[in-house]
């Protein structure tokens, strides 16, 4: 796909969007964002951002765009566990609806932010895109359903690319501290301690800069390309991540970090092959866990209080849910009064 094309990013004001959207603009794309702004708007002021629920996005809103990038929905397990019904609505139904609307509006490409969590709990094997996806938990299940809903619509005129991402980590202007490396960095800096809940499970770790590059490659892939691609910067055990974060923080600061190892059962354990993305999209991840820590440390001053609520999706999500409940209660009281 050529540059100077119009891209609409749904959920583009979130953690990944705040890194990706400026990169797309720098690469010559004209970018607009639709987002509910749950975590505020941290995008540059020259980006057109419309505050709106993507369920209200119509064909008219999508007309004239060449590609739609889906970055919305509930983006981790705690949110999904807190509200399983909303999770399936936002993560499974919403991408299906948006891919349908985009296709009818003449948008040529739909790029879906999927997750390697679709693989669930696997045994000691590297999973590729042909391996069974079998999560038993709301988040992983809903990400798979959203992916399938969008991919159902692919044809020679409508490309659907699903990027199954590892756990994205690193600095973004819309910061999250509930992602493994970021969380370990925070406790190392604040409490001089890192807790590893299960050292032996595997996680693909994905530097947010590699992540943004993959979306760019997906946009620029041949127009008739569709499919699923695993994308990550590398596979690590959680114990290895903890040790690497500990060593790097000690090197960058004057702190002595305590590493606490526990053995808590986990619902996710997977390592993935990114060979298909490398071969077909030209994906070349270049960052390591150490790079992620270095980048977080470099932005220490920009991040401020590492424990602020806005850095934890579940805290904000619970607040929003409480406000919605209150509003619905008030509306039903008005109805009771009327009749
Ligand atoms: N961050 C990761 O490690 C990771 C890994 C794999 C996949 N993903 C997927 O990537 C996407 C982006 O992740 P993120 O970390 O940037 O999440 P995020 O929670 O920081 O951002 C999500 C954004 O979507 C918006 N949003 C949610 N539902 C919406 C709706 N109905 N209408 C309009 N806006 C809506 C929110 O306001 C928020 O700005 C998500 O789909 C997530 O599931 C993320």
Image (tube, rainbow, N blue to C red):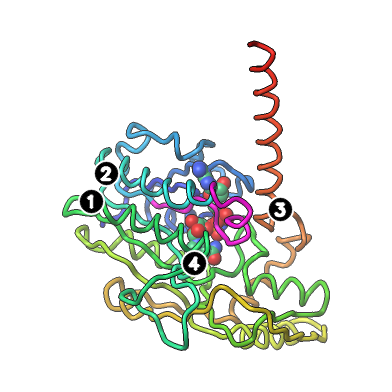
Of circles 3 and 1, the one toward us is 3
Disc 2 is placed on an element classified as: helix
Looking at the picture, tell me which residue is in the foreground, 265 or 181: 265
Disc 4 is placed on an element classified as: loop
Residue 158 numbered mark, or none: 1
Residue 103 numbered mark, or none: 2
Say above or below: 50 vs 256.
above
Which residue is at a point 27% across and 54% down the rendered structure image? 152
**Tags 3 and 2 touching, CB below 8 Å:** no
The crowding category of the residue bearing disc 4, from other C-alpha atoms within 10 Å (few below 14, some 14 to 19, many at least 20), is some
Q: Residue 334, percent across and down?
A: 68, 17
Q: Which residues are magenta?
A: 69-85
Disc 3 is placed on an element classified as: helix
Q: Which residue is mark 3?
A: 315
Say above or below: 235 vs 176.
below
- Specify which label sits upstream in the sequence, 3 or 1: 1
Which residue is at a point 35% across and 70% down the rendered structure image? 229
**Tags 2 and 1 touching, CB below 8 Å:** yes
Residue 136 numbered mark, or none: 4
Q: Residue 65, percent across and down?
A: 32, 42
Q: CA distance from mark 4 to mark 2?
A: 30 Å
- Specify which label sits upstream in the sequence, 4 or 3: 4
């Amino acid at each position: 796909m050529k540059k100077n094309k119009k891209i609409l990013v749904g959920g583009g004001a979130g953690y990944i969007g705040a890194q990706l959207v400026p990169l797309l603009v720098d690469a010559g794309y004209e970018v607009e964002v639709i987002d509910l702004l749950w975590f505020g708007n941290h995008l540059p002021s020259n980006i057109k951002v419309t505050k709106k629920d993507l369920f209200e996005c119509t064909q008219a809103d999508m007309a004239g765009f060449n590609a739609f990038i889906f970055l919305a929905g509930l983006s981790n397990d705690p949110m999904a566990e807190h509200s399983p019904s909303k999770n399936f609505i936002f993560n499974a139904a919403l991408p299906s609806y948006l891919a349908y609307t985009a296709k009818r509006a003449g948008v040529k490409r739909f790029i879906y932010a999927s997750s390697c969590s679709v693989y669930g709990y696997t045994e000691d094997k590297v999973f590729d895109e042909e391996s069974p996806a079998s999560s038993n938990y709301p988040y992983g299940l809903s990400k798979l359903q959203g992916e399938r809903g969008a991919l159902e619509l692919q044809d020679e005129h409508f490309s659907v690319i699903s990027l199954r991402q590892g756990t994205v980590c690193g600095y973004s202007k819309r910061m999250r501290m509930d992602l493994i490396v970021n969380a370990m960095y925070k406790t190392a800096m604040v409490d001089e301690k890192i807790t590893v809940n299960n050292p032996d499970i595997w996680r693909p770790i994905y530097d947010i800069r590699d992540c943004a590059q993959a979306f760019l490659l997906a946009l620029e892939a041949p127009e008739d390309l569709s499919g699923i691609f695993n994308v990550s910067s590398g596979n690590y055990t959680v114990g290895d991540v903890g040790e690497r974060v500990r060593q790097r923080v000690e090197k960058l600061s004057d702190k002595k970090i305590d590493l606490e190892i526990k053995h808590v059962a986990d619902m996710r354990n997977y390592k993935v092959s990114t060979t298909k993305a490398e071969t077909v999209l030209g994906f070349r991840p270049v960052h390591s866990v150490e790079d992620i820590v270095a980048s977080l440390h470099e932005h220490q001053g920009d991040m401020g209080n590492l424990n602020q609520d806005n850095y934890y999706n579940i805290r904000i999500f619970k607040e929003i849910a409480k406000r919605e409940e209150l509003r619905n209660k008030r509306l039903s009281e008005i109805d009771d009064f009327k009749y």
